Amino acid sequence: MGSSTSLGRRLSTYYCLKGLELRPNIYIHRAILKYTLSSFKLSILEYCLKENTLIREECYLRLLKPEYNVSTTPSASFLGLTHSEIARSKIGSSKLGNTYGEALKGRVRSAETKKKI
C-alpha cells in the first residue's frame, strides 16, 4: 500500500532488480529481494484525484491491514511535501561533485562504528 502519483515510477522500482538493490533499507524491497516478486501481488486498487490520494489510502489501510506497511497512517507520507528554497539549495550543493557512495570512500570509522556494523 502506498501513495503514489507516479505509477510508472512506483512499478518500475518494484520490477527492476537494480532499483530494489539501491534501496535495500526499505522493508518491502528487502522482502521482494528475499522472497522474489512472484510471491507478491501488486495491484492498483483505485485511481483517484491527487488531492484525494491520502484519504483513499487511509480507507484501504483500515480495510485491508497490509502486512508490509510500516506506517499505518498515510499522513506520515511525504506526498505533497515541498522543500523550501533554502533546503533545495542545500540539497543541491551537497550533491555537487559527489556520486552515490563517493562521500564514504576513504572514511575512517571508529571502533564503535565498526562493532555496530
Image (cartoon, grey):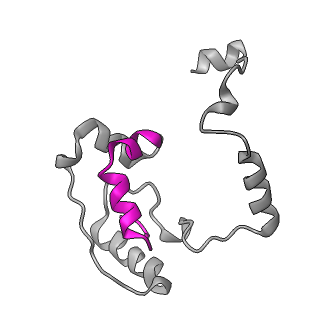
Which residue lies most toward the top here?
111
**Which residue occupies the foreground of this view, 82 or 74?**
82
Q: Quarter-wise, where is residue 78 in the image?
A: bottom right
Residue depicted at x 63% and y 16%: 114
Residue depicted at x 33% and y 48%: 16
Residue depicted at x 45% and y 46%: 26
Of the 4 image quadrants, the one containing the N terminus is bottom left
- Horizontal and vertical percent position of residue 90: 79, 55
Of the 4 image quadrants, the one containing the C terminus is top right
Q: Which residues are magenta?
A: 1-24
Question: Does residue 82 appear left or right of residue 36 in this picture?
Answer: right
Residue depicted at x 27% and y 72%: 44
Q: Looking at the image, is 31 positioned above or below residue 105?
A: below
- Horizontal and vertical percent position of residue 43: 24, 67
Question: Does residue 24 appear left or right of residue 39 in this picture?
Answer: right
**Is residue 20 rendered magenta in the image?**
yes
Q: Looking at the image, is 106 positioned above or below residue 32?
A: above
